[in-house]
Amino acid sequence: MTVHALNDQEVALLRNELEILMQERQKLLRLAGAAAVLAANLDPGALPRNRETIDAAEMMGECLNALSEETLKDALRLVDAQIE
């Protein structure tokens, strides 16, 4: 196998891995968008007042707040949410 053939094979593998990562990013953006819509529409008074629920809601809020504005906009666009 020549160096050129090896490089072509490595490029093909990298392209394949990049495609997998882009597909995974789309799925994670959809999940983030759905979580943001859920958080925006939740009535906090309707949530059970147990530690597990509160911890989960706080974790979701922290994760959403950690996203960049551009990433959050992409996520909301993917789930057709209204961006205000």
Image (cartoon, grey):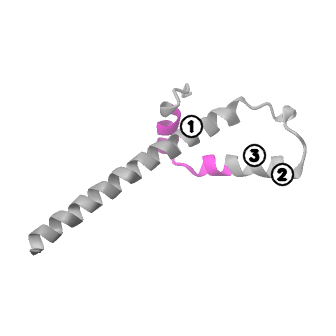
Q: Which mark is residue 58?
A: none
Q: Earlier in the sequence, mark 2 or mark 1?
A: 1
Is residue 67 shown above or below 6?
Answer: above
Position above or below: 53 against 10: above
Name the residue: 69% across, 36% down: 39
Residue 66 is a magenta residue:
yes
Residue lying farthest front?
1
Which secondary structure class fits the magenta region best? Answer: helix
Q: Which residue lies under the disc numbered 1?
A: 33
> In the drawing, does residue 55 fall left or right of residue 72?
right
- The local secondary structure at tag 3 comes to helix
The percent coordinates of residue 50 (x first, y second) are: 90, 47
Q: Point out the image quarter for the N terminus.
A: bottom left
Compute the Cα span from label 2 to label 3.
9 Å
Q: Are marks 2 and 3 in contact (CB under 8 Å)?
A: no
Q: Is residue 3 magenta?
A: no
Q: Quadrant of the C terminus?
A: top right
Residue marked by disc 3: 57
The residue under the point 53% across, 30% down is 79
